[in-house]
Image (cartoon, rainbow, N blue to C red):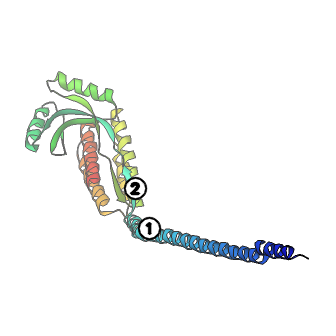
C-alpha cells in the first residue's frame, strides 16, 4: 500500500462525525424538554390552585355578609307570627248625603243645626283635619239621590257622593279577623235592610258582639264602642234616620281602628 493511500484513510476518518456524539446530544435535548414541561405544569397547577382558592375565599366572604340579613328576616317573620296575622283591612264602600266640608268642628256643628227643622240627624266625620257634615249613608246611589232631592226641596243644600273608609295593613289575631269580618258583613246587611224600608235587627248585633271574645286591645275597644252604640240606638225611638246615624257612627269607629 502506498503512503498516499494511508494518509487518505487517516484524513477521511477525521472528517466523519462520530455517531456517539450525536446520541449524547439527543438525550440532553430530551432531558431539557422534560424539565421545561415539568416547570410549565408546576406553574399551571400553582396558578389554577391560586384561582380556585380565590373563588372559594370570595364565596365564603359573601356568605358571611348575607348571614346577618337572613337572621334578621327570620326574626322579623317570628315577630309577625307572635303579634298575629298581617291582613289588609279593605275599605267599606257606600254613598252619603253631604251637607258641607269644614276646617273646624264648631263650624260643622253649627251647620248641622240647619237640618233640625227637617228632622234630619247629621253626623260630623273628621278625617285628616277636615270635618265632613253627613246627613245619611246609603248602600244604593239612587236611594241616596232621592233623599238628597227631598232635602233640596226643603231648602237644604246637599249632594250625594261616594264614600269609603281608608284601608290599611294591620297585625291582628285570628279571633280579631273573624270578629271584624262578621261585623262588616252585618253592617252591610243592616244598611241594605233600611234602604229597603226595614229596620235593623239589633238582636243580631248583640248576638255577634257576645259571640266573639279574646280580642286584641284595639279591636276590643272597637267592640266596646259598638256595644255602646247599640245600647244607645235601642234606647231611642226606632226610625230609619236614627239607624243611619248608628251605621255612620259604627263605620267611623271602624275607620279609626285602621289608623292605630
Please name the residue that numbered disc 1 is placed on. Answer: 62
**Depicted 181 relative to depicted 24: above or below:** above
Residue 126 at x, y percent in the picture: 18, 45
**Residue 84, placed above or below residue 97:** below
Judged left or right of residue 133, residue 85 is right
Element carrying mark 2: helix
- Furthest residue to the right? 1
Report crowding for label 1: few under 14, some 14 to 19, many 20 or more residues within 10 A (C-alpha): few
Residue 186 as seen in the image, left or right of residue 35 = left
* Front residue (pair 228, 84): 84
Q: Which comes sooner in the sequence, label 1 or label 2?
A: 1
- What is the spatial separation of the Cα atoms under label 1 and label 2, in whole angstroms? 41 Å
Give whichever of 76, 40 is nearer the camera. Answer: 40
Residue 93 appears in the picture as rendered: yes
Residue 113's spot in the image, x, y percent?
A: 10, 36
Q: Position of residue 62 (x, y in %)?
A: 44, 67
Q: Could you tell me residue 156's position as x and y percent?
A: 15, 27
Residue at 23% in and 27% down? 148
Q: Are circles 1 and 2 on residues that touch, CB within 8 Å? A: no
Q: Is residue 217 left or right of residue 56?
A: left
Residue 151, compared with residue 174, is above or below; it is above
Where does the C terminus fall, quadrant-wise? bottom left
In terms of secondary structure, where does tag 1 sit?
helix
Q: Which residue is mark 2?
A: 177
Quadrant position of residue 125: top left
The label number, if any, that marks residue 230 in the structure image: none
Amino acid at each position: 500500500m502506498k503512503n498516499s493511500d494511508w494518509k487518505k484513510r487517516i484524513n477521511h476518518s477525521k472528517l466523519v462525525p462520530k455517531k456517539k456524539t450525536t446520541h449524547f446530544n439527543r438525550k440532553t435535548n430530551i432531558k431539557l424538554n422534560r424539565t421545561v414541561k415539568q416547570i410549565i405544569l408546576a406553574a399551571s397547577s400553582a396558578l389554577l390552585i391560586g384561582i380556585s382558592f380565590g373563588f372559594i375565599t370570595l364565596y365564603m366572604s359573601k356568605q358571611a355578609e348575607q348571614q346577618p340579613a337572613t337572621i334578621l328576616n327570620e326574626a322579623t317573620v317570628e315577630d309577625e307570627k307572635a303579634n298575629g296575622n298581617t291582613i289588609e283591612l279593605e275599605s267599606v264602600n257606600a254613598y252619603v248625603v253631604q251637607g258641607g266640608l269644614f276646617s273646624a268642628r264648631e263650624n260643622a256643628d253649627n251647620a248641622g243645626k240647619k237640618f233640625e227643622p227637617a228632622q234630619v240627624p247629621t253626623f260630623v266625620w273628621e278625617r285628616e283635619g277636615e270635618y265632613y257634615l253627613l246627613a245619611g249613608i246609603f248602600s244604593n246611589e239612587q236611594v241616596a239621590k232621592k233623599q238628597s232631592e227631598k232635602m233640596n226641596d226643603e231648602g237644604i243644600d246637599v249632594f250625594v257622593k261616594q264614600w269609603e273608609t281608608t284601608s290599611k295593613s294591620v297585625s291582628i289575631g285570628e279571633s280579631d279577623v273573624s270578629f271584624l269580618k262578621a261585623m262588616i258583613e252585618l253592617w252591610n246587611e243592616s244598611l241594605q235592610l233600611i234602604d229597603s224600608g226595614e229596620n235593623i235587627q239589633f238582636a243580631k248585633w248583640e248576638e255577634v258582639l257576645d259571640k266573639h271574645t279574646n280580642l286584641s286591645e284595639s279591636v276590643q275597644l272597637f267592640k266596646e264602642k259598638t256595644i255602646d252604640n247599640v245600647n244607645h240606638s235601642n234606647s231611642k225611638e226606632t226610625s230609619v234616620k236614627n239607624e243611619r246615624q248608628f251605621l255612620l257612627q259604627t263605620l267611623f269607629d271602624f275607620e279609626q281602628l285602621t289608623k292605630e
